[in-house]
Amino acid sequence: ATPQRALAIVSGGSKHYVWLAQGSYSGPLDLTAADDNVGVFGGFSPNSWAATYNPTTPTTIAGSPQALLVNGATGVTLQQLKLNGQAPSAPSSSAYGVLALGGSQLTLTNVAVQAQNGTAGTAGTAGGGGAPGHAGADGAAGQTPAELAAACLASAAHCVPVDPPGGAPGVGANGNDY
């Protein structure tokens, strides 16, 4: 059984109260104008149905994107509950502990309301190309051959000749060296 099913049983009838045992329930719990003057009370012992104020195991209703949606219902009382709104997994989604719309009137007594963080938005599109850069500056003067030789000799690795010595003579097409 779910809190929503219990609410459907009492709505519009002679009973106006839903008692929920301690523990966790899947939501969301949705109330409309048909649920005027309904009370939802949690914290009851699952064994004896004795009411327990602030039990160690609370009565928790968790739903997505909200734990409780009240739309146009008035005179609603909620007591001894923990309402936990969870964000859907879709990008840019929000979460609400309680979402009250359409002139709803409700009283919360010893009710903890929590909403998880919403989800991140979708990534933006790539921006357009940037403006062209400015022209570069003129290059500096090069080194003289004497400055280049001095710098080469002063370096730890010394310089490597630009034109290294040639290789061994090749072998002719007939395998002879001539």
Image: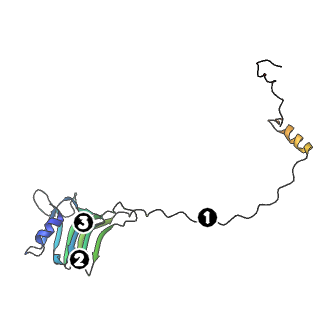
Choose mark 3 or mark 1, whichever is in front: 1
Looking at the image, the residue that sits furthest to the front is: 174
Choose mark 2 or mark 1, whichever is in front: 1
Residue drawn at (11%, 71%) of the image:
10
Helix, strand or loop at label 2? It is strand
Quarter containing the N terminus? bottom left
Report the front residue among 89 and 107.
Answer: 89
Looking at the image, the residue that sits furthest to the top is: 176
Q: Amino acid at mark 3?
A: Pro
Residue drawn at (9%, 58%) of the image:
48
Report the front residue among 96 and 164.
Answer: 164
Label 2 to label 3: alpha-carbon separation: 16 Å
In the rendered image, residue 21, in percent from the top left (x then y), is placed at: 16, 61
Q: Which residue is mark 1?
A: 129
Q: Amino acid at mark 1?
A: Gly
Residue drawn at (77%, 60%) of the image:
136
Report the front residue among 174 and 58.
Answer: 174
Against 177, residue 158 (above or below) is below
Of the two numbered discs 2 and 3 on the same chain, state the one appearing first in sequence. 3
In the rendered image, residue 98, in percent from the top left (x then y), is placed at: 29, 71
Helix, strand or loop at label 1? It is loop
Q: Which residue is mark 3?
A: 28
In the rendered image, residue 153, in percent from the top left (x then y), is placed at: 86, 37
Choose mark 2 or mark 3, whichever is in front: 3
Q: Which residue is mark 2?
A: 106
Of the two numbered discs 3 and 1 on the same chain, state the one appearing first in sequence. 3
What crowding class fits label 1: few (fewer than 14 Cα within 10 Å), some (14-19), or many (20 or more)?
few
Q: Is residue 166 left or right of residue 88?
A: right
Helix, strand or loop at label 3? It is loop
Q: Amino acid at mark 2?
A: Leu
Q: Is residue 98 left or right of residue 39?
A: right
